[in-house]
Image (cartoon, helix red, strand yellow):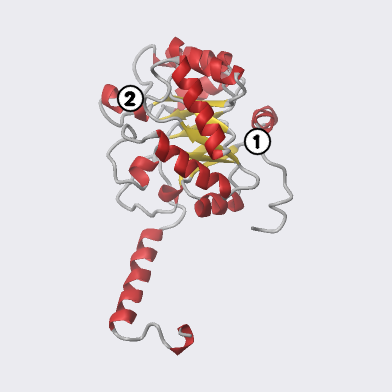
Amino acid sequence: MTSGTAERPRITVREVLAKKQRGERLVMVSAYDALFARLSEEGGADLILVGDSMANAILGLDSTVPVTMDQMIHHGAAARRGTSRAMVVVDMPFMSYQVSTEDALRNAGRIMKETNAHAVKVEGGDADIAARIQAMTRAGIPVMGHLGFTPQSVNTLGGFRVQGRAPGDQERLIEEARRVENAGAYSLVLELVPSGVAKAVTAAVRIPTIGIGAGPDCDGQVLVLYDLLGLNDQFKPKFLQHYAELAADVRSAVGRFADDVRGGRYPDADHSF
């Protein structure tokens, strides 16, 4: 790890809340394994989200709906082992918390015990979800909320669409954000929401908001590591900025390796025992 990383204290719920009070922006990166979690932490990420976005990013699925508890736990545990400072948050997958409070508690507890993560994330802001959040936080499980475009509801929402443009949507999202906050959530992702709506929601709650496709006025930002690295160069939504163009580097490196193998140049004497 980089110098001094191991000595820095783990980021906690209290520190996440304090950053909003101090006006410091939070940085969250979605990563799914020990190596990329470690590199993200060393690069400066405050939080590592082990998102069910792994469905699209690494599993080749069209939506997050098929992701299972076992998959989330497998990747959550791996990412947690790669960190020493960042707060690790694991998504609760589709239908692991929607049916009942008992299901939510059982599955959230399993995630916390089997991954050693620091929090879970759930989507939605209606009264039923608020009840789940309240039960989990009362049981000692920190919960991050998620409003706006909620990927687990993609089939109900009619695809990957910006949310919050219709009349009354801003008021509804503020109400949901306050409900999630009052239930005990310590932070809130806002996804695919108009900038003005996200700004209003951020001002309406005491907990920090973390945006993705929600403009510059959230208290923090999150991107999937594969996306910000430009590894999937076929994924180009408006909100995404590539901070590297690694797809071309990967193709080039594998191409050079293939050429050397086929040409008998690798392995050479320097790379043999």
Q: Residue at x 32, y 86 (%)?
A: 264
Q: Which residue is mark 1?
A: 24
Where does the N terminus fall, quadrant-wise? bottom right
Q: Are marks 1 and 2 in contact (CB under 8 Å)?
A: no
Q: Residues within 10 Å of mark 2 (few under 14, many from 20)?
A: some
**Which quarter of the picture shows residue 168?**
top left
Q: Which mark is residue 90?
A: none
Residue 167 vs 44, above or below: the answer is above
Q: Is residue 127 left or right of residue 185?
A: left
Disc 1 to disc 2, C-alpha distance: 31 Å
Q: Position of residue 180 (x, y in %)?
A: 52, 17
Which sits earlier in the primary sequence, circle 1 or circle 2? Answer: 1
Q: Which residue is mark 2?
A: 153
Residue 183 vs 112, above or below: the answer is above
Residue type (three-letter) at the residue carrying disc 1? Glu
Q: Position of residue 144 (x, y in %)?
A: 53, 27
Q: Residue at x 53, y 49 (%)?
A: 37
The answer to whether residue 237 shows anywhere in this view is no
**Which quarter of the picture shows residue 245?**
bottom left
The secondary structure type at the circle numbered 1 is loop
Q: Position of residue 151 (x, y in %)?
A: 36, 30
The answer to whether residue 119 shows anywhere in this view is yes
The secondary structure type at the circle numbered 2 is helix
Q: Position of residue 192 (x, y in %)?
A: 39, 30
